[in-house]
Amino acid sequence: MDPKDLVWAGFPELKAEIERRITTSIITSPSRIVLNWGRYGSGKTHAANYYSRTDILDGLADSLQKQRPRSIKINLPRTSKDPVQAFLRSFFGQIGIQRIKEDLTYI
């Protein structure tokens, strides 16, 4: 499925809560992390995919007159002997060393 085709249907209170958390993250610092967790089948992946859409993040950031945050989705395996290593592999695998170098150049 194309991410642009994702829609949010129902659960308006949950949508508002997620947007409040993302908005707080955008306002307070560009390095904040928003964790998304819940029971199996509760919509975590759908919410992550929906809020990772560039147009959705642009809309939230534009309404706050802030720069759009980066969205990195990391799924950790349920049974990992080393969860830190699993997190780092997923994180660096998604953003890449080149992107880190480019970001550090601007600091």
Image (tube, rainbow, N blue to C red):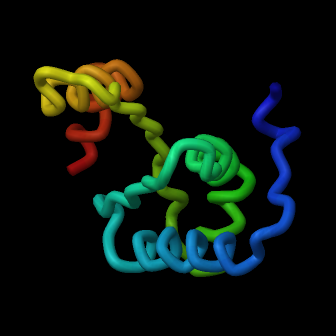
- Please give the name of the residue rendered at 14% of the width and 32% of the height, measured from the top-left corner: 84
- Please give the name of the residue rendered at 34% of the width and 19% of the height, measured from the top-left corner: 93
15 or 92, nearer to the observer? 15
Quarter of the figure with residue 8:
bottom right
Task: Please identify the quadrant where the N terminus is shown.
Answer: top right
In the displayed structure, does residue 85 sit left or right of residue 99?
A: left
Q: Is residue 73 above or below residue 21?
A: above
On the image, the x and y values in percent for residue 79 come to 26, 24
**How many marks do you count on the picture?**
0
On the image, the x and y values in percent for residue 60 come to 64, 70
Quarter of the figure with residue 104:
top left
- Please give the name of the residue rendered at 84% of the width and 52% of the height, measured from the top-left corner: 7
Farthest residue toward the front? 40
In the displayed structure, does residue 93 sit left or right of residue 23?
A: left
On the image, the x and y values in percent for residue 78 come to 32, 29
On the image, the x and y values in percent for residue 61 come to 59, 69
In the displayed structure, does residue 73 sit left or right of residue 63?
A: left
Q: Is residue 101 above or below residue 28?
A: above
In the displayed structure, does residue 55 sit left or right of residue 84?
A: right
- Please give the name of the residue rendered at 58% of the width and 77% of the height, measured from the top-left corner: 17
Q: Is residue 27 above or below residue 69?
A: below
100 or 1, nearer to the observer? 1
